[in-house]
Amino acid sequence: MNKILVSIVMGSDSDLEIMREAGKALEEFGITYEIDVTSAHRSPDRTAKFAREAASNGIRVIIAGAGGAAHLAGVIAAHTTLPVIGVPIPSTSLNGMDSLLATVQMPAGIPVATVAIGKPGATNAGILAAQMIGLSDAAVAKKLEAHKEKLARVVEEKSRRLKESSKSQNPHP
């Protein structure tokens, strides 16, 4: 069995649909991960224990998603030296702005890398974790290069199709 390198945690199982996107991104790069629920507020001792033991359990990056007060990533970062990526979850009437601000406003000395709100942020969290792991794993780094090349090809193809479509709609520019 492959060693788990990334831990994806969330404050509630209602965040799972969003946080699965981080897992999908990690799978694209062949990175093993675990996914679980822990809460900065409802299970603070469990959360602190998880954070303190993560490195000794082989985890290299933690991705933490939380909505509302969104303290999960910060609490975890306070208890570990591992990189922590925070994913703000749009779970309240503020559409995730509260979560974004709570996640990004960390005091000096306790960094949390914060990505966009919701599914795009969760995807980027997975990619960012892969980039961190890719610093010391050549196979992951190569997959990241292929990912960037794929993104560029998609843009080129869209550009080509758009130009062809506009030529057929306006044959006399």
Image (cartoon, rainbow, N blue to C red):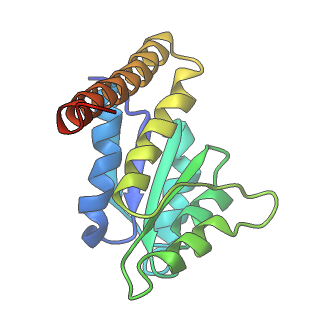
Q: Quadrant of the N terminus?
A: top left
From what the image shows, is residue 31 above or below residue 9? above
Residue 159 falls in which quadrant of the image? top left
Residue 161 falls in which quadrant of the image? top left
The structure residue drawn at horizontal position 33% and vertical position 38%, both measured from the top left corner, is 25
In this orientation, does residue 125 appear? yes
Residue 77, percent across and down? 63, 57
Q: Quadrant of the C terminus?
A: top left
Looking at this rendering, what residue extends furthest in the bottom direction?
Answer: 93
The structure residue drawn at horizontal position 17% and vertical position 32%, both measured from the top left corner, is 168
Mark count:
0
The structure residue drawn at horizontal position 51% and vertical position 77%, both measured from the top left corner, is 97
From what the image shows, is residue 55 above or below residue 161? below
Residue 8, percent across and down? 39, 50
Looking at this rendering, what residue extends furthest in the left direction?
Answer: 168
Looking at this rendering, what residue extends furthest in the front direction?
Answer: 172
